[in-house]
Amino acid sequence: MNNLTNKYGSFQEGAKRLQAATSGVPDRIPVYAAMHDFARHEFKLSSKDFYFKPDVFVLALLDTHLKYGIDVATIGYDTYNIEAGALGQEIAFNEDSVPSAKEPIINTPDDLKKIKTPDFSSDGRFPFVNGINTLFQELTGLTPVIKYCAPFSLAANLRGIENLIMDMYINPDFARELLTTLTEDVIAPWICYQQKLFPDAKSICGADAYASPPILSPSFLAEWALPPIVRLRELCGEGVYVPNWVGDSCFADPEEMFSCKLQACPKFLEGQDPDVEKIGPEKYKEYAEKYNVPLVLGIGSKFLAQASQEEVVDRVQNYIDIGGRGGCFALYLCGLAKTTPPENIRAVIKTITGYSS
């Protein structure tokens, strides 16, 4: 075992803590974070290096975890851009923001012919993803989480979200064919390719922010965004899930949204600020207990960027007091970015390690 592996092997303890938290009471509350933008700026790396060189990316993320004491190591990247970029959509890599898709490339039904199953060993940034997952496994001894852009959000990137929603009203056959083609010919094969690389991977996590209310109503969410996820589960196994729909606070009865969430992510319930802040963590805990699933509460990116350290401590304590009751709970730091004060991250970790032990 080399020095790097010794250094990063400590993350196995965090992985065990998270596993313990899914079924009972761990020694303390585990915490994980979405942080690629924060990590890049922490080490003053260019987008072209960070988002294209697996070794640069992985070492920066793991070292950021270690520096701030985030015990559950995850390799989160710009998931929404991988399939889209390989299919020909231009992705902007700016120094002051996270990578983002530019102009839509599916403008008419004839453009569906452009969608072909990529070569996942060479096309676009698929090799980058393969590289970061391989290096993560080598350094930590942990199996990576397989990630993908969910069908609705990929369609929204390629078609444009406004165009896609309009299609759902006036040309639903086109919208359905787009979603089906992406599901069957791009996303499912990409997941299966990753499963062959990492046969021990049990978690297959999709990103689907575009499907969140108020962008979609609950009825449209159930009709358009959920069925492709269910289809992916049929094609690729029970490990397929999408945890990151938000917008729960848009509804008079948040349980209407919670029900949709558990269909997309049957093994745990995730809530994120500002929804949790508005609804209260009690609603989430009660629903999770009712359906006997673990709960993950996410502290919001905007809150972490703007709150005082005292406010951060109060929120962490509140979420631990309520969410951590009886165990089956983890804390998630949503979207750490270059605007996140480092002292607020340290306040989170200090509170967790001292308050929940």
Image (cartoon, helix red, strand yellow):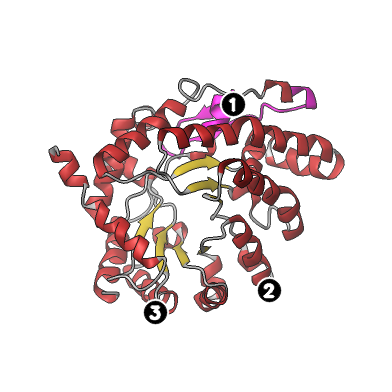
Q: Quadrant of the N terminus?
A: top left
Which secondary structure is most common in the magenta stretch?
A: loop
Q: CA distance from mark 1 to mark 3?
A: 45 Å
Say whether residue 89 is magenta. yes
Q: Residue 177 — which label?
A: none
Q: Which residue is mark 2?
A: 253
Dividing the picture into quadrants, the one containing residue 252 is bottom right
Q: Which residue is mark 3?
A: 321
Identify which residue, 49 or 190, lies in the foreground. 190
Residue 70 appears at what percent x and percent y? 29, 56
Pick whichever of labels 1 and 3 is earlier in the sequence. 1
Amino acid type, mark 3: Asp
User: Is residue 206 shown to the viewer in this render?
Assistant: yes
Q: Quadrant of the C terminus?
A: bottom left
As helix, strand or loop, the secondary structure at mark 1 comes to loop
Q: Which residue is mark 1?
A: 89
The answer to whether the residues at label 3 and label 2 have Cβ atoms under 8 Å apart is no
Identify whether 35 is placed above or below 251: above
Residue at the spot 59% in from the left edge and 31% down from the top edge = 102
Residue 111 appears at what percent x and percent y? 73, 23
Residue stretch in magenta: 82-111
181 sits to left or right of 110 = left
Identify whether 280 is placed above or below 161: below
Residue at the spot 40% in from the left edge and 31% down from the top edge = 130
Amino acid type, mark 2: Asp
Identify whether 255 is placed above or below 114: below
Say whether residue 21 is magenta. no
Residue 335 appears at what percent x and percent y? 44, 52
Dividing the picture into quadrants, the one containing residue 187 is top right
As helix, strand or loop, the secondary structure at mark 2 comes to loop
Q: CA distance from mark 2 to mark 1?
A: 38 Å
Q: Report how many numbered discs are placed on residues in the image.
A: 3
